[in-house]
Image (spheres, rainbow, N blue to C red):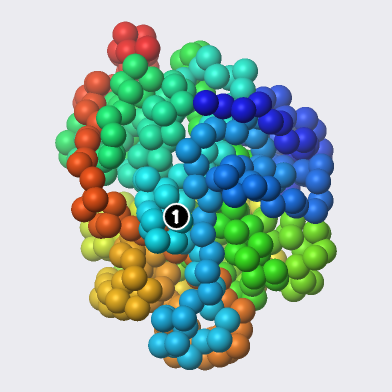
Amino acid sequence: MKKISKTNYRLRSIASGAVFDDEGWTLEAPDELRPGLIRALYEKKQIDFKDPSLGIYRFADWLPVNNFLEGSSAPVTYKSEGLAGQLGLTNLYITFSGYWPEKDAFMNTCSFKETEAFSVCGRLNHCNSKVLVVASAGNTSRSFARVCSDHKIPLLICVPEDNTDALWFDAPIDENYVKLIVSRTGSDYFDAIYLSNIACRHPDFIPEGGAKNIARRDGMGTTVLSAVEHIGRIPEYYFQAIGSGTGAIAAWEASLRLLEDGRFGTHKMKLMVSQNHPFTPIMDSWLAGSRDILPMNDEEARGKVEKIMAKVLSNRKPPYALAGGLYDALKDAGGEVLAATNREAEEAGRLFEEIEGIDLHPAASVATATLIRAVKDQKVDKDSLIMLNITGGGEKKFMSDKALYYLKPSEIFDMNPTVAEVHARLDRLF
Ligand SMILES: *Cc1c(COP(=O)(O)O)cnc(C)c1O
């Protein structure tokens, strides 16, 4: 099921510039005061695109992996005719992550979170005996559950009980390896994160790490590698809907590697990232020129999250301020933070399905809506080289093609359980 194939790389702290080795699961630079990301420095500065049969691992020169797992699917890029014609664009490229058999896109969890799951699980090595812990409200948990189940990798996922309907699959999940714990009905994503933080203090568990995990970011960056392989050039504009912005940081990092590669142009790729109005903390902070996310009143934030249709875009603590984070990415690359209303997104999603031929995840509809608006507002030219990152799609098609299975919780926790209680109940699980 897995093939040993190790990519050579070292790590660099963005805050201090220090270069050091990966100890196996390094998520942070040692002994640093300023919070910041670490980045992989790959030995190969020019990427070889490997055989398509390897799925996402065809980009392994720039993935921090020790193993290739079977069953992955790379993002697919094609030149748009339908949407491009409608908008009068001559160089619009669509990079699609999801389920779209006609285009050879077979991500069975229907979003680009699958790229991170295959990359992160490919990075696991001697840490394999520990249980990987992931907290998420939907697509991330679904992707990790599928990949870990298929490859017998122990996984604990922490989700609010009210979100468990997001954990649908086309085949049963192997519950010997994948366990779901939930925070009881009425709790939210932060209660699930609280559970995952306690779990990670147990010696048998390791955190997946979120944006801090180089494998997560470089997995997501394969969307840009797919685009550049197809186009032959770095795009001028990159459109993506963001919640945490990890995907946009990843896209920026991929574009920097491609600049260094030297074969794909000398221009920066402008980041045109988008949120779902009215939940726009990143846009508000960016427009205010603030390096920190502007403080948000708890109740107000919850109210706004309730209103948006693309719930995956509701992250309240994005990796924005830290060194090498989203603020630095936007400053360096240039670009804008945009927003679309539910209505604009719905219309864009409908149009896309009609003229490109596949249903979109609501987040991808948000990105499409902001592209449509940017063309109207003449923020891009007709001939600009544009990449539209369709981060999720084909769910409707996938669900109509298959019978669905749901993952059931092994343990349900009330508000604020103690460390001892959580650890005792986890000990019984694995
Ligand atoms: C998670 C997610 C996003 C947002 O990704 P970031 O981590 O904020 O870059 C966008 N679209 C879909 C479908 C997602 O699942």
Q: Residue at x 39, y 64 (%)?
A: 364
Which amino acid lies under the numbered mark 1 shown in the image of this protein?
A: Ala
The residue at the point 49 percent across, 47 percent down is 73
Given residues 254 and 425, the one toward you in this image is: 254
| Residue matched to label 1 | 105
Pinpoint residue 125: horizontal percent, then vertical percent: 61, 22
Q: Residues within 10 Å of mark 1 (few under 14, many from 20)?
A: many
Determine whether, in the image, residue 111 is placed left or right of residue 48: left
Q: In the figure, 148 relative to 260: above or below?
A: above
Check disc 1 and report its element: helix, strand or loop: strand
Question: On the rendered image, what quadrant is the C terminus found in?
Answer: top left
Left or right of 250 in this view: 397? left
Q: Nearer the viewer, residue 213 or 319?
A: 213
Image location of residue 28, percent across then percent down: 65, 35
Percent across and percent down for residue 114 are 46, 44
Question: Does 207 sit left or right of 64 as displayed?
Answer: left
* Residue 222 visible: yes
Instruction: Describe residue 427's horizontal placement relative to residue 331 as left or right.
Output: left
Q: Residue at left 32%, top 13%?
A: 429
- Residue occupying the point 37% across, 45% down: 108
Residue 234 placement: quadrant? bottom right
Report whether residue 34 is seen. no
Q: Is residue 171 above or below residue 252?
A: above
